[in-house]
Image: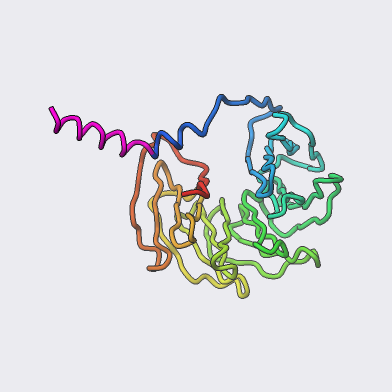
Amino acid sequence: DYVPATRSLRKRAASSSTSTFAKRFTHPVVLSLKAAPTTVDFSPASPHDLCVASSLQVDIFSLRSNSVYRTLTRFKDVVCCAAYRQDGKVLAAADEVGTAQLFDLGSRAVMRTFKGHSGAVHALRFSADGSRLFTGGDDATVNVWDISGEQLLCCAKGHTDFVRTVRTSDASPHVLISGSYDHTVKLWDVSSARPIMTIQHADPVEDIALLRGGGVLAVANGNRITFCDLLSGGRVLHTTAAHSKTITTLHADASH
């Protein structure tokens, strides 16, 4: 009788990390929108409010009051994406006509406007120091913008289809990562817009996420998530396919 008891204890210990993670979630709060949401982003700064883009607006949602406390409506077409600056005080958002705007969340005023894409912009991200904005568009290009001067620094050309995601790395601030419907992930030298690595995938790339440390990249392509080792030239470490349909969004838990 002693041996089975030991095995039972080991099984419970193996599943303890999963149980602890699941207990962090509580009953959902439902937010009604005017149209289907196109993007959701959490503020990096406490209290970690979130923005939700849908139709011609971006709603700012408070996690303390569980309600919308600010709405941005200065758009001419459907908002495709939005992202917070590291301090949570400025929000960037882009639309179907290819225009990206920066908003002061305190006053809702438009601080900067960037026009340089010939198609919709579905991906944008601030640099770690907040001095630059990176945008990826349906014109298959990735643009690097100087925020203070409100001007285009360089245009990275190399993708052959829609760019759907861009990411930066805290470990390598001079490197920008983009994913496209051409089935590739590209790493760019920000200073020269030169591709320094290309990783081929089986399906169109919808989203990417850097895991803690910045050495491993998770890539959503089709119904799979592929984990690539950037330190060894993009070598595939593991692929998992737990979904029956296309995975459109990835987010890495900072504690893992």
Of all residues, the one furthest to the bottom in this rendering is 192
- Viewed as shown, does residue 154 lie left or right of 102? left
| Colour scheme of the rendered structure | rainbow
Viewer-nearest residue: 21 or 251: 21
Q: Residue at x 69, y 57 (%)?
A: 117
**Residue interval drawn in magenta:** 1-16
Q: Nearer the viewer, residue 26 or 199?
A: 26
Task: Please determine whether, in this image, residue 154 is positioned above or below residue 218.
Answer: below
The total of numbered circles placed on residues is 0
Q: Position of residue 229 (x, y in %)?
A: 39, 62
Is 7 on the left or on the right of 247, as rendered?
left
- When the figure is inspected, residue 24 is found, relative to residue 255, above or below; the finding is above
Q: Is residue 143 above or below residue 92?
A: below
Q: Residue at x 41, y 47 (%)?
A: 225
Our reading of the magenta stretch's main secondary structure is helix
Residue with the most extreme front position: 2
Residue 15 is one of the magenta-drawn residues = yes
Q: Quadrant of residue 149?
A: bottom right
Q: Position of residue 255 (x, y in %)?
A: 50, 48
Decide: is 75 above or below 12.
below
Q: Nearer the viewer, residue 15 or 210?
A: 15
Give the image location of residue 197, x and y in percent: 46, 68
Q: Quadrant of residue 20?
A: top left
Residue 230 location (% of width, % of height):
43, 64
Horizontal side of residue 70 vs 11, given as left or right = right
Residue lying at 69% horizontally and 40% vertically, measured from the top left: 49
**In the rendered structure, does residue 46 fall within the stretch colored magenta?**
no
